[in-house]
Amino acid sequence: MSGAAAVTSEPAGTPAGRPVGLPAGEPAATSMTMVKALNLALRDSLRDDPTVHILGEDVGALGGVFRVTDGLAAEFGPDRCLDTPLAEAGILGTAIGMAMYGLRPVVEMQFDAFAYPAFEQLFSHVAKMRNRTGGRMALPITIRVPYGGGVGGVEHHSDSSEAYYAHTPGLHVVTPATVADSYGLLRAAIASDDPVVLCEPKRLYWTTGPLEETAPIGRAVVRRTGTSATLLTYGPSLPICLEAARAAEEEGFDLAVVDLRSLVPFDDETVSAAVRATGRAIVVHEASGFGGIGAEIAARVTERCFHQLAAPVLRVTGYDIPYPPPMLEKHHLPSVDRILDAVARLQWEQ
Amino acid sequence: MTIVHDSVPTDLVGSVGLRGPRRDPAPLLPDAEPLRVLGTRAAVTGDPDLALDLYSRLVLGRRFNRQATTLTRQGRLAVYPASTGQEACQVTAAMVLADQDWLFPSYRDTLAVVARGVAPIDALTLMRGHSHCGYDPYEHRIAPLATPLATQAVHAVGLAHAARLRAAADPRASAANVVALALVGDGGTSEGDFHEALNFAAVLRAPVVFLVQNNGYAISVPLAKQTAAPTLAHKAVGYGMPGRLVDGNDALAMHQVLTESVAHARAGRGPVLVEAITYRLEAHTNADDATRYRSAAEVDDWRTRDPLTRLEAHLRAHGQLTDATAERLAAQAEELAAEIRAQFEAAPEPDPRSLFAHVYATPTSQLREQAADLDARLALDAEFAADNSHNFDHTDHADHAAEGAGGQLDRDHDGRGDLR
Ligand SMILES: Cc1ncc(C[n+]2csc(CCOP(=O)(O)OP(=O)(O)O)c2C)c(N)n1
Ligand SMILES: [Mg+2]
């Protein structure tokens, strides 16, 4: 086993000639849940690349608490889809060692808040190994993290932890909002020679949609064009933003909606262009605002689009509080009303 | 062939029921006393070539530690956590591994890294502050020196597990026999990652040898404040692997226990935990003041149990070390020291442009922007330095720049870097 094998740039999981994000033998129009699309992405990766190994808690016979690994242990055997002892640092640390030896581990963290025990392994080793070794040792590990609220989860089951990951150089951080992107981004993450944290919006797990071609990691997409203002969002907040845009029409606003998809690398180009087109921008996410992704985006947009801006960049985010109990979460989460209120504050009378 | 199913040990007592396998703990228990070979019959009847070989490695190892410590005083190393007094552990850990095996060292184990064949200058780039890891992990099959305590023990498990998986997939592969050896300190055994590593290794039956160098202290904290376990080796039993206790200052005993442990792991019998009782003769690092937490009498007492002098006394007593050989080894040690000094003389400065090179396989657009910014600043600095070299006018700007550079040099040279 040589080092070179661990850092090949052509991932075995992406057969040449197939467009990103379309599984073999699956008619593009097939509609399925996000869970099913993620499951399919794992299955296709396991089938195409013998170095892909899944490990996590309850990923075997149970198929994961969200069933994303359903049937994989039965189809590929317990070595390829391993029920580990219950210890997140142990899971990720073991994945590191496996990646050192040329495997492509896919780690499932059971819930957002239960990934925290693995943060030392993630921040001190996963994110840094390529850099620490002067490029000699890559760690092509995919870390799947179901995240976010809106599902009535009691405490520790609804955190939005994406900013912790995005703040750590060396990690790629992606978060799908559609069924097609969940398949495409997971396959791209597994094929990537860099570690990728895939933040899966659990409130969208049961939404359905078609599988279609998607973009590689690092590209945002304009989900709705508009002329009045631009909503910048990702993951669980995309459907709310699209709903807000529809509601805003009645008030005479034509809102554009950008789905970031990839937090790291960040697609400055698409975001800046979309903001310049309207001159007004609001960032929407579930995570607390202070020191969050929205703050970074507001700063980036201001630095790049200052002269095209007609109003300060606003944020609609979760409050700066520990995630609330489920009976109160609707007040905490960005809502259509809060987004519309922010739109109204974009200094229209000038 | 799957290996996970194999992981249920065959030496079970009772049945594998809902409550899991039940095993007789007795065979896993460490001996009551650390294994000692020096001073026993085994030392006399053993292979004299091995004893002399070990001795020569200890001599070189000690000289390496002394030279590295000197380099900290000269400001050439930012920090050095010496393994002086622990050389028997260091050199045997490297010696017992086969070519295909992997070593997972901590910050205190530079000597083990050198003993496995890495050039001293490359092994010391971390301590120089030059780069985080100066050697190719794949060339030497040594993970980068790990500073976050016990984290490397889990990596050893994953690598050993992966090697078994690959061997199962292709029985002809050389992976069939890979063993990983992880080095951890006594303080590191309190970390959650140590626990998780042992548990994962045992459950997966991964071929890993965990070597704990119990040198009595974690910086200032003595072992008594670290654990209430009978010995650290006893911790093995709770995970279902054998624990071995060994005199870490007895090179012959170290060699024996590690050889047996590696063979155990290689044979597919699962992991082993070895606790080596040793002592850190120097401070935690050059930046530490050990007089604040331990007495000179204690250190002096341990000097009488120095691994080097103990083995030397044995060899001399049995006529296995002549003055001529001792002189030859001393000369070799001086050669090593001179070579290290020469390597440091010749070592290049780090290139600031390397900062952005290996964050990702392909730099992000943001990193490219930042690299361009640094490039521009470097170009300005170079221009300024060129101007300044033939212009001794002291403008405010020149004074300020000189001060900045000087401050940086001071920091580099007072040897105050630390691993805390
Ligand atoms: C996770 C973590 N916590 C704290 C430290 C700071 N630290 C560095 S060395 C050390 C003591 C470790 O003692 P031990 O494991 O006995 O190893 P030794 O230094 O004696 O070889 C500490 C606390 C660290 N490196 N990593
Ligand atoms: Mg110690």
Image: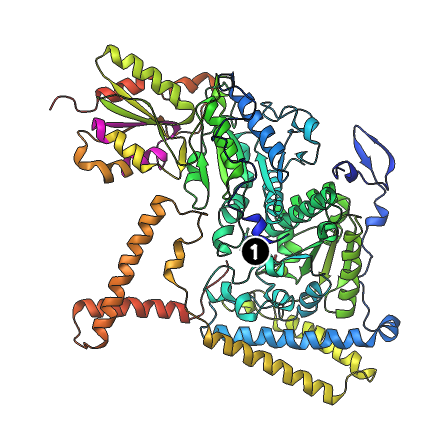
Q: Nearer the viewer, residue A293 or A231?
A: A231
Which residue bears the numbered disc 1?
Answer: B146
Residue at the left extreme, as displayed: A350
A90 shown above or below B273: above
Quadrant containing the C terminus of chain A in the rendered view = top left
SS state under label 1: loop
Q: Nearer the viewer, residue B106 or B221?
A: B106
B294 shown above or below B358: below
> Which residue is pictured at 54% across the width and 35% down the height?
A15
- The subunit letter for the residue under badge 1 reads B
- Residue B263 vs residue B112: left or right? right
Q: Given the image, on which type of amino acid does mark 1 rest? A: Ala
Residue B285 visible somewhere in the drawing: no
User: Which range is magenta?
Assistant: A276-299
The reply to whether the magenta stretch includes residue B69 is: no
> Which residue is pictured at 61% across the width and 27% down the height?
A69
Q: Is mark 1 within 8 Å of ligand 1?
A: no
The reply to whether the magenta stretch includes residue A298 is: yes
Residue at the bottom extreme, as displayed: B324
- Residue A227 vs residue A161: left or right? left
Label 1 CA crowd tier, 10 Å (few <14, some 14–19, many 20+): many
Residue B394 occupies quadrant: bottom left
The location of residue B316, given as percent across then percent down, is 79, 83
Residue at the top extreme, as displayed: A250
A350 shown above or below A78: above
